[in-house]
Image (cartoon, rainbow, N blue to C red):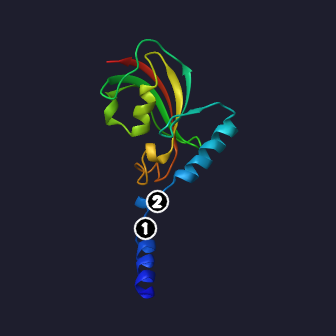
């Protein structure tokens, strides 16, 4: 019986891959360190998104099905920029969870900075060569309009 239990534990340990890694604790440590070093105040949503609204904008906020046009800059905690645009249009439901949540916190003309733990960004798989699995990503977003 002990051999079967030991074998089961070993199989579980060696079958874990990066796809199953939980980066939540390390992401939280890294985000809090970044916020402290930046000397900025951020709020935290129930999902774990950290946000700082710079300009409130006016009107209504987009919903999950809205088409929007916005400017953004996406970068890592070390400052490396992985993507940016001054005028991108898309449906809010077609982006990573944290980015969609961030856009829904803004109103047209509004802007803010949003810190996404990996579970709200590209998860354990990452994206392309720039974003590795488990990476925390940051977006500066300016909502131009709801289309």
The residue that appears at 58% across and 47% down in the rendered structure is 28
**Residue ID for mark 1:** 16
In-front residue for pair 30/69: 30
Res 21 label:
2
Q: Please tell me how crowded label 2 is: few (under 14), some (14-19), or many (20+) other residues with Cα within 10 Å.
A: few
Vertical placement of 144 versus 128: above or below? above
The residue that appears at 31% across and 24% down in the rendered structure is 66
Residue 33 drawn at (x, y percent): 66, 44
Residue 124 drawn at (x, y percent): 43, 54
Q: Earlier in the sequence, mark 2 or mark 1?
A: 1
Q: Secondary structure at mark 1?
A: loop
In-front residue for pair 109/46: 46
Residue 141 drawn at (x, y percent): 48, 27
Find residue 71 and report its image quarter: top left
In-front residue for pair 13/88: 13
Vertical placement of 143 versus 7: above or below? above
The residue that appears at 43% across and 81% down in the rendered structure is 5
- Check contact, mark 2 vs mark 1: CB within 8 A: yes
Q: Please tell me how crowded label 1 is: few (under 14), some (14-19), or many (20+) other residues with Cα within 10 Å.
A: few
Label 2 vs label 1: CA separation? 8 Å
In-front residue for pair 69/99: 99
For the C terminus, the image quarter is: top left
Residue 74 drawn at (x, y percent): 48, 36
Res 112 label:
none
Q: Secondary structure at mark 2?
A: loop
Q: Looking at the image, how many numbered discs can be counted on the residues?
A: 2
């Amino acid at each position: 019986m002990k051999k079967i239990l030991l074998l089961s534990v070993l199989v579980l340990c060696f079958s874990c891959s990066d796809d199953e890694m939980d980066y939540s604790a390390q992401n939280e440590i890294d985000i809090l360190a970044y916020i402290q070093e930046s000397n900025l105040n951020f709020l935290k949503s129930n999902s774990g998104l950290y946000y700082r609204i710079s300009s409130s904008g006016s009107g209504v906020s987009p919903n999950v099905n809205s088409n929007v046009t916005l400017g953004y800059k996406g970068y890592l905690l070390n400052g490396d920029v992985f993507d940016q645009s001054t005028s991108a249009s898309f449906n809010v439901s077609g982006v990573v969870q944290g980015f969609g949540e961030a856009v829904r916190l803004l109103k047209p003309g509004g802007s803010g900075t949003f810190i996404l733990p990996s579970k709200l960004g590209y998860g354990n798989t990452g994206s392309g060569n720039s974003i590795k699995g488990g990476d925390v990503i940051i977006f500066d977003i300016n909502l131009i309009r709801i289309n």
